[in-house]
Image (cartoon, rainbow, N blue to C red):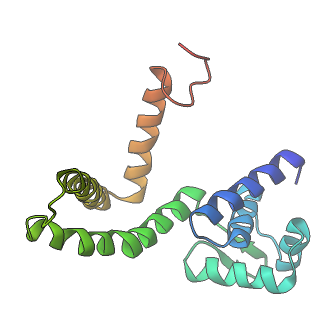
Amino acid sequence: MGSSASAIVEWLADVGGRWGLSADACRVHGLLYLMARPLATEAIAAELTLTPAATDEALAWLAAEGLVTGDSEGWTTRADPWLLMLQTLEKRRQRELAPALAVLGPWRQSGGGEENPLVARQAKRLLDLVEDLAAIDAGTRRLSPRTLRRVVGIGGRAARLFGGAGNRGGSS
């Protein structure tokens, strides 16, 4: 694996770590995705300079999540990083959305109960944001991962076409 591919694998590890995933699992997944062929556990460990224990732990987690499979030829993945991201989003949703609504929902039901109008306004804005995120989440969960990926891809291409974020053509 060349230095550019190594940089991609490390970037995936960094992004995954910020999303609460194991950096080593993201490294392993990124390597398997980029190599697009089965790799033996020892080859994965050597390529990523991971200990055998760290490699085994990463592979076990990825296998439990259905992101890699292993056989006599080695480990492979058919899941691109998009699937890993979707699974991570689902776990974050489960971990964060319900508790946010549990805290903010009763506030609304009690009429806010806040005498300070500035605090009441800010709390309402926060509740509106969480409820908007919950509505978006509910809508997107009805889409298959493949359809959701296409929708995001179309949106990204449209944004680049019309001068949005990530436009490679320079500033407009």
Say whether residue 161 is left or right of residue 117.
right
Q: Quadrant of residue 20?
A: bottom right
User: x, y percentage for residue 83?
Assistant: 52, 62
In the picture shown, does residue 56 fall above or below 110?
Answer: below
Point 20% across, 51% down: residue: 121
Q: Position of residue 75 (x, y in %)?
A: 73, 74
Quarter of the rendering containing residue 30:
bottom right
Nearer the observer, 146 or 138:
138
Foreground: 10 or 96?
96
Based on the displayed image, in which of its 4 quarters is residue 138 positioned? bottom left
Q: Is residue 80 left or right of residue 40?
A: left
* Identity of the residue furthest to the front in this view: 116
The quarter in which the N terminus is drawn is bottom right
Whether residue 72 is visible to the viewer of this picture, yes or no, is no
Closest to the observer, 25 or 113: 113
**Left or right: residue 88 compared with residue 1:** left
Front residue of 5 and 69: 5
Can you give x and y, in whole percent of width and height, for residue 172 in the image?
53, 12
- Identify the residue at image location x=42%, y=54%: 146
Is 160 located above or below residue 72 in the figure? above
Q: Residue at 30% x, 73% y: name it.
A: 98
Q: Is residue 148 left or right of residue 160?
A: left
Residue 47 x/y as whole percent: 89, 66
Q: Which residue is found at the position 58% from the left and 16% from the top? A: 171
